[in-house]
Image (cartoon, rainbow, N blue to C red):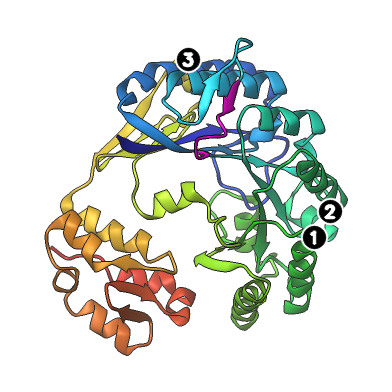
């Protein structure tokens, strides 16, 4: 049975962060019930096409999914479990879906913000089979959090993390943001050290990107955003890698670190071009090399509008994506897998590119694997652009 990943988008949050360009809406809590109904309709309408698929991961992202009430998240999960074939779950008389201990767990993640986590929600998540939390911390410094536009403070995060452990969660990611305005290497060292004291299983450390349409973009254009200089950003980047590796975390992707066995299976699926189905507002899907996206108009989605964009990926685009996405992983890409998929030699397909990047110290070729060096990871956008095919 072929595998399939599921993504559910929850576009609501308490407040829009100053750096965020995601499709999300603050102050629209009155629309959450109607939205959950719309997602359930989409699940029920769509699931019939994928009864021959085994669901291997579910990721509930946003926005802030933890903003949903207990009743709303339970409705979503019950609809999901009753509609798709998710191994390891069975229905009970009361309609709750629990994992069978004899079956391997499907990874089910939910993104949470500290201010919207409660003991009641955490207990419900566990009961519904959610087994991985991704908590948005971003910084351990309250002044940083205020500058970023976050709602929570550090103490709220600490209490939420402790509550998650008490509820039985043993697979927790902490999101951090580095190279933010005003940040020094010394300040970042403190953030990483404090984060490490919580011993999460996974840490995502993303560099700030100035995105179009955000508050930060406006401040940047006005010259009022005090970003770290290039040397400081480079020092922060390398310190993150060295500190976390010494603490036992393996970098398995450019910005993601985990303890052994706790890599995010859902995201690895994206980077290895696994089939995934997106449900909800503006959610993207990619199945059998066809990509599509739902409408980004909230009112239209609630009213029943569906796909607005559809694209069939050419063979050339598939090969480019194989390299673009696969080389984000520290293990890199496999020559054999490339040949099995496309029936042609990887080195011949990208003739001249691989020797050039190897000579520049940006790429390593070891047996079947091709991967980026540490320096290649550092300038990954430039390196990956080399794999654009001209014909």
Q: Are marks 2 and 1 in contact (CB under 8 Å)?
A: yes
Give the SS element for disc 2: helix
Query: Can you see residue 317?
Result: yes
- Principal secondary structure, stretch drawn in magenta: loop
Residue 140 falls in image quadrant: bottom right
Q: Which residue is drawn at 33% across and 50% down?
A: 273
10 Å crowding of disc 3: few (<14), some (14-19), many (20+) = few
Question: Which numbered disc flags the more N-terminal residue, 2 or 1?
Answer: 1
Foreground mark, 3 or 1? 1
Please provide percent x and percent y for residue 276.
Answer: 38, 39
- Residue found farthest to the right: 155
The vertical placement of 365 against 34, above or below, is below
User: Along the polypeptide, which appears first: circle 3 or circle 2?
Assistant: 2
- In this rendering, would 378 be left or right of 366? right
Determine whether, in the image, residue 157 is placed left or right of residue 373: right
Q: Name the residue: 34% across, 88% down.
A: 360
**Residue at the disc numbered 3:** 303
Q: Is mark 1 on a helix, strand or loop?
A: loop
Say which quadrant the C terminus sits in: bottom left
Q: Mark 1 points at which residue?
A: 140
Residue 35 in view: no
Q: Quadrant of the N terminus?
A: top left
Q: Eyeballing the image, is 330 above or below 62?
A: below
Which residue is identified by label 2?
Answer: 154
The span from disc 2 to disc 1 (Cα, nearest Å) is 6 Å
Residue 23, placed above or below residue 362: above
What are the residue bounds of the magenta stretch?
97-106
Pointer 3 and pointer 2: residues touching (CB < 8 Å)? no
């Amino acid at each position: 049975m072929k595998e399939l990943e599921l993504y559910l988008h929850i576009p609501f949050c308490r407040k829009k962060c100053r750096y965020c360009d995601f499709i999300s809406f603050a102050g629209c809590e009155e629309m959450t019930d109607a939205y959950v109904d719309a997602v359930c309709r989409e699940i029920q309408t769509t699931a019939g096409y994928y009864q021959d698929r085994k669901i291997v991961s579910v990721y509930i992202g946003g926005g802030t999914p933890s903003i949903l009430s207990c009743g709303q998240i339970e409705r979503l999960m019950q609809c999901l479990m009753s509609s798709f074939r998710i191994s390891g779950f069975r229905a009970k008389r009361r309609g709750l879906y629990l994992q069978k201990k004899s079956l391997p767990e499907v990874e089910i993640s939910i993104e949470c913000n500290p201010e919207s986590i409660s003991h009641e929600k955490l207990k419900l998540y566990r009961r519904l089979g959610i087994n991985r939390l991704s908590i948005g911390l971003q910084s351990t410094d309250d002044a940083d959090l205020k500058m970023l536009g976050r709602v929570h403070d550090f103490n709220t995060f600490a209490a939420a993390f402790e509550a998650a452990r008490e509820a039985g969660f043993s697979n927790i990611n902490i999101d951090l943001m580095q190279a933010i305005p005003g940040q020094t290497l010394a300040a970042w060292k403190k953030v990483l050290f404090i984060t490490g004291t919580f011993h999460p299983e996974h840490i995502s450390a993303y560099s700030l990107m100035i995105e179009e349409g955000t508050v930060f973009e406006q401040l940047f254009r006005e010259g009022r955003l005090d970003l770290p200089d290039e040397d400081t950003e480079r020092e922060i980047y390398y310190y993150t890698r060295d500190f976390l590796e010494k603490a036992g975390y393996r970098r398995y992707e450019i910005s993601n670190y985990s303890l052994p066995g706790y890599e995010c299976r859902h995201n690895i699926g994206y980077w290895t071009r696994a089939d995934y189905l997106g449900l909800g507002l503006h959610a993207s899907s990619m199945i059998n090399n066809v990509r599509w996206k739902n409408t980004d108009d909230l009112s239209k989605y609630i009213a029943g509008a569906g796909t607005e964009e559809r694209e069939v990926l050419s063979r050339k685009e598939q090969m480019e994506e194989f390299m673009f996405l696969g080389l984000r992983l520290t293990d890199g890409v496999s020559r054999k897998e490339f040949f099995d998929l496309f029936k042609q030699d990887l080195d011949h397909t990208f003739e001249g590119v691989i020797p050039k990047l190897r000579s520049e110290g940006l790429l390593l070729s070891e047996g079947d694997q091709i991967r980026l060096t540490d320096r290649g990871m550092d300038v990954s956008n430039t390196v990956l652009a080399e794999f654009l095919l001209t014909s």
